[in-house]
Amino acid sequence: MSDGGDRVVAAFDFDKTISTRDNVIPFLRAVVGRARLVRALLSISPRLVAAALDDDRRDAAKVALVRRTLTGYDAARMTEVAAEFAHDVQARHLRPDVVERVRWHRDHGHDVVIVSASFKDYVEPIGAELGTSAVLATELAVGDDGRLTGELAGPNVRGAEKVRRLDTWLGARPAFVWAYGDSAGDRELFARADQPIRV
């Protein structure tokens, strides 16, 4: 435990940790509709679809799916859909026990940070409602024309990237880090934490 003098930070994964489910596919369905999502999934090679189930190759599958669904989509409209999606997730798909743990950390004066491969567009509004200090999540690239390029704006925030993003946010100030997660994508975050907790 912390000696009481250091900053204390609680880093939470989002999908299947704060939320009861994975949210990427439901979000893409909300943005582009079921038919376009299904067409996109069918257009991806079987090897990439299999990669989505293989923890070591999920990033490539996610990038391919984003390219096939969101390229050229109006960014302002996507922000509106993300706000609606965030409201639905908050109303129906949050884990009460983990939300209570977020409150516990906040009540003890700890910084709470969400570190997630889910898209920042909908995680950030939920983080604001939960009173988090920051949301470090996967971002979508927007072109000069105000439309999504179909690329990620930086790496997918999972595995080692979670640690890199958290350490960048922490800066040089020492911190005792709690980490909450549910999957192999949180291994590195657990290894980095002073107090890892598998949800």
Image (cartoon, helix red, strand yellow):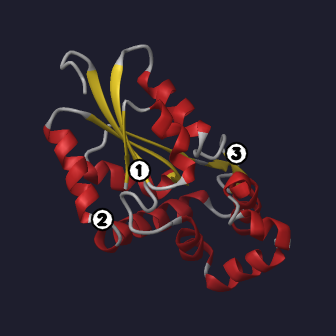
Residue 72 visible in the current orientation:
no
Query: Disc 1 vs disc 3: Cβ atoms closer than 8 Å?
Result: no
The residue at the far left in this view is 107
Q: Residue at x 53, y 75 (%)?
A: 30
The residue pinned by badge 2 equals: 95
Q: Is residue 176 above or below residue 156?
A: above
Q: What is the three-letter code of the residue carrying label 1?
A: Glu
Q: Residue at (39%, 68%) from the top-left corner?
A: 20
Residue 115 % position (x, y): 46, 44
Amino acid type at mark 2: Arg
Q: CA distance from mark 2 to mark 1?
A: 17 Å
- Position in image of residue 198 (x %, y %): 39, 51
Seen from the viewer's position, the closer of residues 4 and 28 is: 4
Q: Quadrant of residue 194?
A: top left
Question: Of circles 2 and 1, which is in front?
Answer: 2
Q: Indicate left or right for 118 with 106 as reference.
A: right
SS label for mark 2: loop
Q: Measure how far apart labels 1 and 3 are at the Cα level.
A: 23 Å
Q: Please, what is the three-letter code of the amino acid marked with disc 3? A: Asp
Front position in the image: 131 or 142: 131
Residue farthest toward the bottom in the current orientation of the protein: 35
Q: Which residue is mark 1?
A: 124
